[in-house]
Image (spheres, rainbow, N blue to C red):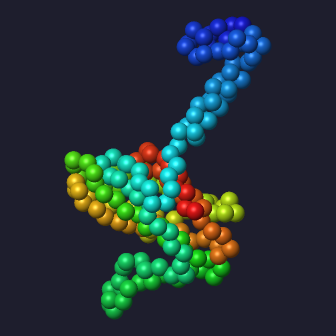
Amino acid sequence: MAIPGLILGLLGIPTSVFFLVQKPEDIIEQMMGSSQREVRASETVIRLGEGIRIGELLVIFDSVKIAKTYDTGRVAILTGVPIVEKAKPNYKFVIIKVKAKNIGKKKDSLWPWPSYPEQDYKLEVDKGYIYGPIMGESILSISLMPEETGSDKLVFEILKTTMPVKLHASIKGRRFTVNLK
């Protein structure tokens, strides 16, 4: 029992004074558990309307709107009529408006391709269910020069009997939660 603890110590892995009675797997599990708690504790939590800096951009999750339909921002090619999506029966849309301002000294963006895989959003509702954004409204497309401002939206489709409470987000490696209440 003492040899595994000694080897871990020589490798620079801190061990407990109880290394004579602890298995190496237990020591590693204890270390991993504490580092996971530290990561969760260091995650940023902001309120709706507050900003978070991501690169050169100050990003503000500005407002939440509940709707039966939403305007996609696209138009039908032949008629020029705006395309409006309707929620499925027993569902509703949650539309989160996002604003950004470039407060830095160079161009920055949350999109296109370099940051595409670096955006992830999950909406948590009052019943604990987790929803991903709907296709076509799952990536923030904001690209700004210094002092410019812009906006975009995220759209989720959730059960009518639920209410959004938190948005869990990851943008360019920065994880944070937005309280929507």
Q: How many marks?
A: 0
Residue 17: quarter of image: top right
Q: Left or right? Give the position of 75 relative to 50.
A: left
Q: Where the C terminus falls, by quadrant? A: bottom right
The structure residue drawn at horizontal position 43% and vertical position 44%, both measured from the top left corner, is: 173
Q: Where the N terminus falls, by quadrant? A: top right
> Residue 136, percent across and down?
44, 69
> Residue 130, percent across and down?
62, 60
The structure residue drawn at horizontal position 41% and vertical position 54%, both measured from the top left corner, is: 51
The structure residue drawn at horizontal position 60% and vertical position 16%, both measured from the top left corner, is: 14
The structure residue drawn at horizontal position 32% and vertical position 89%, both measured from the top left corner, is: 80
In the rendered image, is residue 134 in sight?
A: no
Q: Left or right? Give the position of 108 relative to 84.
A: left
Residue 112: quarter of image: bottom left
> Residue 151, percent across and down?
35, 66
Task: Please identify the residue farthest to the bottom as the structure is shown.
Answer: 79
- In the foreground, 86 or 104: 104
> Residue 178, percent across and down?
52, 55
In the rendered image, is residue 52 in sight?
A: yes
Q: Is residue 126 above or below residue 20?
A: below
Q: Is residue 56 above or below residue 124?
A: above
- In the foreground, 27 or 3: 27
